[in-house]
Amino acid sequence: MTSFLIFLGILAAIVFWTIGIYNKLVNQRNRVRNAFAQIDVQLTRRYDLIPNLVEAVKGYMKHERETLEAVIAARNTAVSSLSAAKADPANADAMKQLGASEGALGGVLSRLFALSEAYPDLKASQNMMQFQEELASTENKVSFSRQAFNDSVMSYNNTAENFPNSVIAGMFSFKLASFLEIESDEKRDVPEISFT
């Protein structure tokens, strides 16, 4: 009888231990989803600003139609990539596609702003300055949100990969999440320093 009670006690301890790990994994996965929701808010704000920006510059940049069309096309690609990533923030392919489309959008926006330098009236336009300021502010918020998301992903992945949590994660099909890395068209060169 006492051995049966000991067996039940050990079984109950294992069940509670498993439930504890499972709940921890669920909490971590929900933190990842919440962190991605913050990115979604900021990127959606950014995407909503872009058509207004294009309309503001359209009158000044009549000869730059290709650039304006490229901005809109890159925005639309980024919007669809965000939708795919929002459906499953743990999907590595969706995160990679979102990062690539964000990098492409950043590249065409940079070209647009570089071209706007050639139009003094546009550069001095109050609307253009306001859009540039709002986009810069939103870019900062996206950057902070992305960092928070990647921190949540790292915490979740660590929890899911550590033993014995990895056993429970495998039993209940907890997939590892992927970081959001925004690819940039710009190549960053390291400055050369010479002391000779």
Image: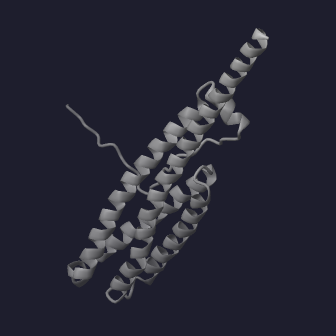
Residue drawn where x is 48% and y is 80% of the image: 69
Q: Above or below — where is 65 with respect to 179? A: below
From the viewer's perspective, tell me whether residue 134 is left or right of residue 158: left
Can residue 118 be seen here? The reply is no
Residue drawn where x is 48% and y is 77% of the image: 72
Q: Quadrant of residue 194?
A: top left
Residue drawn where x is 39% and y is 86% of the image: 63
Residue drawn where x is 33% and y is 43% of the image: 190
From the viewer's perspective, tell me whether residue 19 is left or right of residue 139: right
x, y percentage for residue 83? 57, 65
Can residue 155 be seen here? The reply is yes
From the viewer's perspective, tell me whether residue 72 is left or right of residue 136: right
x, y percentage for residue 20? 59, 32
Q: Nearer the viewer, residue 106 or 9?
A: 9
Q: Residue furthest front?
A: 1
How is this picture coloured?
Answer: one colour
x, y percentage for residue 103? 47, 59
